[in-house]
Image (cartoon, rainbow, N blue to C red):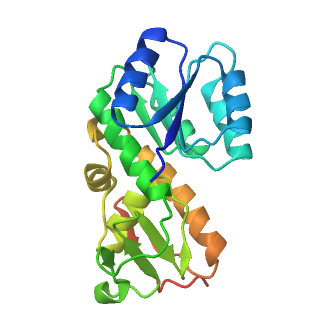
Amino acid sequence: MNAKTILLVEDEQSIADALIFSLEQDNYGVNWCALGSDALTVIDSQKIDLVILDIGLPDINGFDLCKLIKAKQDLPIIFLTARQEEVDKLIGLEIGGDDYITKPFSLREVSSRIKVILKRYGRSGGSSAEGINAASLMGVENCTINNETLEIHYFNQALDLTRYEFLLFKTLIESPNRVFSRDILMQHVWDEPERSFERAVDTHIKTLRAKLKKINGQVQPIKTHHGLGYSFNDKEVLG
C-alpha cells in the first residue's frame, strides 16, 4: 500500500517541525509550505491525500485557500486555528473543511483525526458485509451505514459527508423517530462539546439536508422538532 502524502500549510516553524516529525513517524509523506500560494502550486503538481491548513497564513486567509483547494480537488482538509471564536469553526466546516483542531493541540490527536478522515475518503473497492449495518434491520429502508469505510449510502448513492455530518446522520439513523436534543447530539458527536455552541448542530444539519436533497428532493428524512431537536424518518415525504 502506498504511503499517503499530507500537505502541511503552516507558517510557524516550531509547529511545522513538530507535525512533520510526528507525521513521518506515522509513515506519512509530508510536503510543507509556509504560504498558501506555494500550497496551490504543490496541489497542481503533486498527488496529495490530505491537507492540514492553518487559518492564519501570512499571504492568504485559510478559509479562502480552502475554497481554492476544493475548486481544484476534493481533498480532505483539517484546519489548524489559534482562534477560539466559534464562527471560525463553523465557517471553516461550511466551506468544505472536514475537521478543525485548536492550538495548542496533542500530536496524538492530530494523528487520530487524520486516520479517521483518510479512512472515510479511502473509497476502498468492494465492501464486506461485516461492519455494515443493514438499514432494514433498523426499520430504515433507504440508508446503509458502512462502519469500516465510514460511509453512508442514501437511496443507493454514497454521500460525501464531513466528519460531523457523518456522525450526526449516523446517530439519527440508528434510532429512527427518536428526538435528539442539540445537547445530546453534541455529546454523541463532538469530542469537546463544552467548547462548541449548540448552533453548530443546526449548521451541520443544514448542510447535511442540502446533500440529501440533491439525491432525493421528495423526502425530508431529518425532521425538526421546534424547541426540542431533531429526529430521523426516511418515509417523511414532502407535500
Front-most of residues 209 and 72: 72
Q: Is residue 74 visible?
A: yes
Quarter placement of the C terminus: bottom right
In the image, what residue occupies the spot 45% across and 70% down? 152
In the image, what residue occupies the spot 57% across and 76% down? 157
Left or right, 106 with reference to 74? left
Could you say where residue 233 lies in the image, as x and y percent from the top left?
42, 79
Front-most of residues 160 and 37: 37
Q: Is residue 88 above or below residue 220?
A: above
Could you say where residue 100 lies in the image, as x and y percent from the top left?
44, 35
Quarter of the image holding residue 43?
Answer: top right
Quarter placement of the N terminus: bottom left
Front-most of residues 58 and 229: 58
Left or right, 169 with reference to 32? left
Q: Is residue 125 above or below residue 82?
A: below
Left or right, 75 with reference to 162? right
Could you say where residue 171 lies in the image, as x and y percent from the top left?
32, 65
Q: What is the tally of numbered marks visible in this picture?
A: 0
Give the residue at the far front of this rendering: 1
Could you say where residue 159 lies in the image, as x and y percent from the top left?
54, 67
Q: Is residue 224 visible?
A: no
